[in-house]
Each structure stands twice: as C-alpha cells, then as structure tokens.
Amino acid sequence: MERIFLILGALLGASGVAAGAFGAHALKTWLSSELTAAFETGVRYQLLHALALLAVAWAATRWPSTAVIASGWCFFVGTVAFSGSLYLLALTGTRWMGAITPFGGLFFIAGWLVLAWGVRSTAPRR
C-alpha cells in the first residue's frame, strides 16, 4: 500500500501543478474572478493532499495499520470529490457541482483524524 499511496501522491502532485499552470495562464482570461478562485482553491487542496498521501506512504512503513491505510484512501477520495467538483464547477459553470465539495472536505477531515488515530494506536515498526 505504501507504494500505491506514493504513486497516487506523486500523480496528484504532478497533475496539481499542471492544473495550477493551466489556471494561471489559460483560464484567467476566460473565467470570472469567482470561478478562477474556485479553481485555485481546488488546486491548493489537491497539492496539499498530494503531500498528505506522501506522508501516509511514509507513515504506513512506520506505523502499519488499517487506520493509516484508510486515511490514505480518505485523502484520495477527498481530493477527487473536493478538487474535482471545484474544477468542474469552474470549467462548466454548473453550480450543483458545488454541492459535492463539502463531502470531499469531510473526507479530508476524516483522513487527518484517522491518520492521527492510526499513528497513535499502532506501535512503531523498528
């Protein structure tokens, strides 16, 4: 699982940088300031949680547990739901996509809490 989370984190990081560049160069003239801000928020949270997945990959080697693995999946699902819904909202103007965003946020919160629980409740691997 460590390898999967490292790969997912790296792919989310690379695609987050690409999305940020696309937003900064191609979308600024095409989108309203409100939709540009939504897109940029998606990029920011994607990059942050790409790093979180890298941390999960490391934590899984040190404190291997179901909770640590579950936190990685929470971060991944949260990124797809949160950032993905903001990207679609910005690019299509479909307002109902914003209703999905809070569910992604809940997955982010759960991921951080479950990661803390997994690290706290598991003996470190020596």
Image (cartoon, rainbow, N blue to C red):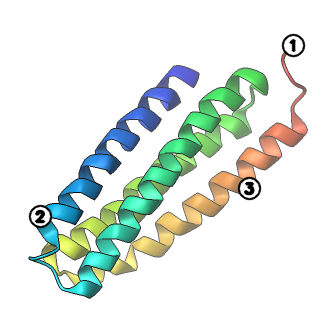
Count residues near mark 3 (Cα–Cα under 10 Å), then give few for <14, some for 14-19, many for 20+.
Answer: some
**Residue 48 visible, this angle:** yes
- Residue type at mark 2? Ala
| Residue tagged 2 | 26
Residue 64, image x, y percentages: 74, 25
Identify the amino acid type marked 1. Answer: Arg
Position of 67 compared to 78: left or right? right
Residue 125 sits in quarter: top right
How packed mark 1 is, by other alpha carbons closer than 10 Å (few <14, some 14-19, many 20 or more), is few
Which is more foreground, mark 1 or mark 2? 2
Of helix, strand and loop, which one carries label 3? helix
Which quarter of the figure is the C terminus placed in? top right
Residue at left offset 42%, top offset 33%: 10
Residue with the mark numbered 1: 126
Specify whether 122 is left or right of 64. right
First in sequence, mark 1 or 2: give its number: 2
The answer to whether 58 appears left or right of 32 in the picture is: right
Image vertical order of residue 98 relative to residue 12, above or below: below
- Disc 3 marks a residue whose amino acid type is Leu
Residues 33 and 58: in front is: 33
Image vertical order of residue 126 relative to residue 110, above or below: above
Which residue corresponds to mark 3?
Answer: 113
Label 3 or label 2, whichever comes before in sequence order = 2
Residue 18 image position (x, y, % from top left): 25, 48
Q: Earlier in the sequence, mark 3 or mark 1?
A: 3
